[in-house]
Amino acid sequence: MDSIKLLTMILMIILGIMLMLLIVLGIVFITSKMGKKQEEEIRDIQNNNKTPKTKKFKEYRTASVLDFMEFDTIVDNMISQKDGKRYIMVVECQGINYDLMSEIEKNSVEEGFIQFLNTLRHPVQIYTQTRTINLSSSIETYKEKVKEIEEALQKQEAHYKQMLKAGTYTQEQLNKAYFELTKQKNLYEYGKDIIYSTERMSSNKNVLNKKYYVVIPYFVEELGDNSFDKEEQRNLAFSELYTRAQSVVRTLSVCGINARVMNSNELVELLYVAYNRDEAESYGLEKALKAGYDELYSTAPDVVDKQIRALNKQIEEEALELAQQKVTEARSEKQKMLAEKRLKKRDLIGELAELMINENTPVIGEDIAKDAIEKLKEETKEEGGKGSGKERQKRVRKTKTA
């Protein structure tokens, strides 16, 4: 028994040694193969300047909206894709505040959305676009309006100063002009405050706005075997897409969502923001178009045109000042005529009364007419004596101030 046990132990030791040798040989073989492969890769890189091949893994990811919205052109409120084989119409939706609704309102919105999904007979994509609110266009509009108000204020101030210098206006007229001037000043200050507040708001880059869209596609293949040309296919696609878009607008209205079909200009802006996310925040589509980024070359405005515009503006300003001056002079001339007529009022009355007496002499009698004319002349002489000297000057001053 002892010899059998000894033999089994020897066999086990021999088997273990053989197993260890096999493992060592395998490791040596694998390392040599890997070393040869690395040497071959290095040799290929040195000889052919090629990078070592890496194993490619297949990636699974959701389709990007940019891939979905690849386009050829924009025509008839549609995005044309794949050389006119596919057309897209977009419906812009106005969001609702679902969290602030009551339970009944939420249920009605959900039921309306279910109805919207059930009525769909064609594929759609819901696209959300987050934009940073850019108030630069609003600021420019405000600045133009405030500039117009400032020009009107300057003209009104000049007119008020002319009224004060002329000294021919009543206190009521001056008060009215001052009231209008104060109102214009307040309007100008209010406009400047609006610009300041809007610029401060636009400096905050965290002011965001979300826009929601429903993208509706149409394939020309849906027409079946057809012999239509490109224009006819586009017209048929527009009719079908417009019908689908209006159906989407009607069903979304049940949810309380206001929607409308976007026109070509709005589609251009939508694509511009989608493809230029970073630039659109500071350099909007309107600025890009004004800058002429889509033109082959740009030219500076003609210097002569600038000079003509400046000269026209100067002529207009000087003509306005001259018109105001002449109006003021005409008013003062009329007031002088009125003052002279007031001074001659008694003389004119006397002359007219004498003429009336002479015309009616046959009726009232010649003797009575002569006595009446003599009394009339005596009274006019007395009035003339009373109104001579300083008293006449006082009357002129009173009429001027009146």
Image (spheres, rainbow, N blue to C red):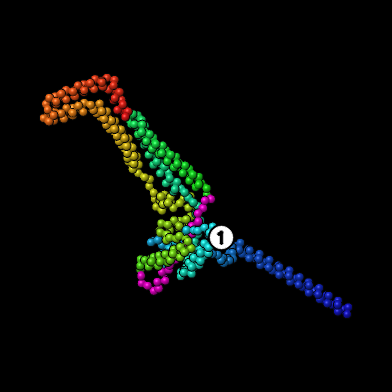
Q: Is residue 172 above or below residue 239?
A: above
Q: Nearer the viewer, residue 89 or 83?
A: 89
- Is 397 placed above or below 241 here? above
Work out whether residue 316 can be spotted.
yes
Q: Is residue 271 left or right of residue 164?
A: right
The question of residue 212 being in magenta is answered with yes
The residue nearer to you, when weighing 61 against 76, is 76
Q: Indicate the position of residue 197 as horizontal and vertical percent values.
A: 49, 44
Q: Position of residue 33 (x, y in %)?
A: 66, 67
> Relative to residue 177, is residue 201 drawn left or right?
right
Which of these two is toward me, 211 or 187?
Answer: 187
Residue at mark 1: 49
Start and end of the magenta stretch?
206-228
Work out whether residue 230 can be spotted: no
Residue shown at 21% from the left, 26% from the top: 347
Residue 307's image quarter? top left
Residue depicted at x 21% and y 21%: 381
The x and y percentages for residue 358 are 13, 28
Residue 255 image position (x, y, % from top left): 48, 63
Q: Is residue 207 in the magenta section?
A: yes
Dot 1: element: loop
